Image (tube, rainbow, N blue to C red):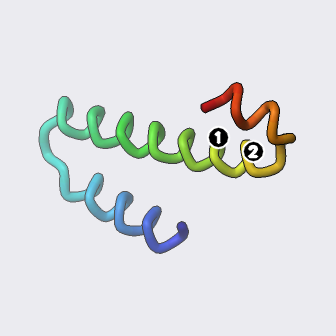
């Protein structure tokens, strides 16, 4: 995950257009939110996991 974050930061650094910068940040935060949701779903009971799905 850290190497992915470093890659995203480097990509953002090289992004010139503001609109593209914002889209990249939003995409990255969405990806992080999905990863957190998956991690928490693993800790939940099977009933909760099926409700999430």
Image quadrant holding the C terminus, namely top right
Q: Residue at x 46, y 45 (%)?
A: 31
Q: Residues within 10 Å of mark 1 (few under 14, many from 20)?
A: few
Q: Is residue 17 left or right of residue 30?
A: left
Q: Nearer the viewer, residue 31 or 10?
A: 31
Q: Is residue 26 above or below residue 10?
A: above
Q: Residue at x 56, y 39 (%)?
A: 33
The circle on residue 40 is: 2
Q: Is residue 38 left or right of residue 22?
A: right
Q: Residue at x 36, y 59 (%)?
A: 8
Q: Which residue is mark 1?
A: 37
Q: Looking at this rendering, what residue extends furthest in the right direction?
A: 45
Q: CA distance from mark 1 to mark 2?
A: 5 Å
Q: Quadrant of residue 28?
A: top left
Secondary structure under tag 2 reads helix
Q: Nearer the viewer, residue 51 or 36?
A: 51
Q: Looking at this rendering, what residue extends furthest in the left direction?
A: 17
Q: Nearer the viewer, residue 34 or 8?
A: 34
Q: Position of residue 26 (x, y in %)?
A: 38, 34
Q: Is residue 37 left or right of residue 31?
A: right
Q: Is residue 2 left or right of residue 31?
A: right
Q: Looking at this rendering, what residue extends furthest in the top direction?
A: 51
Q: Residues within 10 Å of mark 2 (few under 14, many from 20)?
A: few
Q: Residue at x 38, y 59 (%)?
A: 9
Q: Position of residue 42 (x, y in %)?
A: 75, 51
Secondary structure under tag 1 reads helix
Q: Tell how many labels.
A: 2
Q: Are marks 1 and 2 in contact (CB under 8 Å)?
A: yes
Q: Nearer the viewer, residue 21 or 28?
A: 28
Q: Position of residue 20 (x, y in %)?
A: 18, 37
């Amino acid at each position: 995950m850290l190497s992915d974050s470093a890659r995203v930061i480097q990509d953002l650094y090289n992004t010139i257009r503001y609109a593209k910068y914002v889209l990249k940040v939003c995409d990255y935060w969405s990806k992080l939110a999905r990863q957190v949701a998956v991690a928490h779903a693993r800790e939940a009971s099977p009933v909760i996991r099926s409700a999430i799905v």
